[in-house]
Image: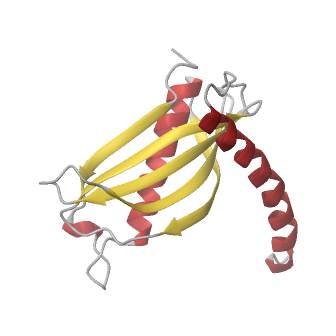
Amino acid sequence: MPGTERSLTLRFLAEPADVNFGGKVHGGAVMKWIDLSAYGCAAGWSGKYCITAYVGGMHFVKPILVGNIVEVEAKVIYTGKSSMHIRILVRAGDPKSSERELCTHCIAVMVAMDENGKPSSVPDWVPQTEQDKRQRDSALKLMAMRDQIREEMTTYVDN
């Protein structure tokens, strides 16, 4: 039911096909996992097909090794009219241990779409805890920063 599934965690093993030339999991593979988890979380919250509008603030903190168990946690931290800000945490570790270390984190903005491919309204998410409120407030600050970055990036776009 829309508006009830706020978070999603994907769990799987990092496979040899995910390796880069340095022997660690390729950053592109991690980005794909982030997009998949953001979509699953946003679709679960909105009950609609969603598209990725933005992924930013991505920090690769620690490498992921082939054979690690990977957990990609996605959680709604802010909703607009048709958009959802999703906090993504990627953790990994030895599958024989319950310990997972933070490897990557970022924010994704997903937009719900209607059957005609137009943005569609999403259920409101209301923060319940102090941490929820801090994350919502951070999402609002990041929106303002993205507007500044978007304007600055026009320097690099040839018209």
**Residue 148 picture quarter:** bottom right
User: Looking at the image, is 67 positioned above or below residue 133?
Assistant: below
Q: Residue at x 70, y 23 (%)?
A: 124
Name the foreground residue: 73 vs 38: 73
Q: Residue at x 60, y 52 (%)?
A: 107
Q: Residue at x 77, y 30 (%)?
A: 81
> 26 left or right of 139?
left
User: Looking at the image, is 144 positioned above or below residue 26?
Assistant: above
Residue 159 position, x and y percent, is 87, 74
Name the foreground residue: 62 vs 13: 62
> 113 left or right of 39?
right
Which residue appears farthest toward the top when viewing the image?
Answer: 1
Name the foreground residue: 93 vs 131: 131
Which residue appears farthest toward the front when viewing the image?
Answer: 130
Q: How many marks?
A: 0
**Residue 115 picture quarter:** top right
